[in-house]
Amino acid sequence: MIDVNLAPVCGLYCGGREFFGETCAGCGRLDGKPFWTAQLSAGVCPLHDCCRNRKRLEHCGLCPDFPCKTFLALRDPNMSDEVFNKSLADRKAALQRREEIGAEAWLNEKAAQ
Ligand code: SF4
Ligand code: SF4
């Protein structure tokens, strides 16, 4: 059975993903606190915190304020503008697809790619 924690609020797909040489368990399993959030004063991803903890939504694409300033501003500082803009477009499309077919079907699609 598909683990829905592999579908975080931001539109990424966490299956088999590696960050900086470390394997991340997925922020859904880690309550929005993957390793990089140790660098933030709040200690939690602002997207996960807002979407799951405050608004109680499955993902940001279901939010009436989407894409909010926080969504548009959160980025890896090592990313070029070009890579970031592509990532934003891909994540917006992924969230729209998730809304259309549901997280489980979307994860099955991603796993098959
Ligand atoms: S940006 Fe936030 S919501 Fe998206 S995968 Fe990373 S920790 Fe999870
Ligand atoms: S306000 Fe922004 S971060 Fe919060 S759920 Fe909406 S789109 Fe996501």
Image: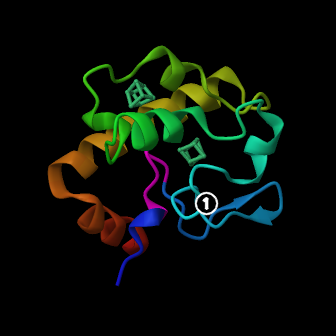
The residue closer to the viewer here, 34 or 78, is 34
**Residue lying farthest top?**
69
Relative to 109, say whether 28 is above or below: above
Res 78 → quadrant: top right
The residue closer to the viewer here, 14 or 40, is 40
Res 37 → quadrant: top right
Residue 61 x, y percent position in the rendering? 31, 36
Relative to 99, say whether 2 is above or below: below
Residue type at numbered disc 1 = Leu
Residue 69 x, y percent position in the rendering? 49, 15
Residue 84 x, y percent position in the rendering? 60, 29
Secondary structure mostly seen in the magenta stretch: loop
Placement of the N terminus among the 4 image quadrants: bottom left
98 in magenta:
no
Q: In the drawing, does residue 34 fall left or right of residue 92? A: right
Q: Quadrant of ligand 1?
A: top right
Span of residues in magenta: 6-12
Residue 113 x, y percent position in the rendering? 41, 69
The residue closer to the viewer here, 56 or 68, is 56
The residue at which mark 1 appears reads as 30
* Numbered disc total: 1
Determine the residue positioned at 72% across, 39% down.
43
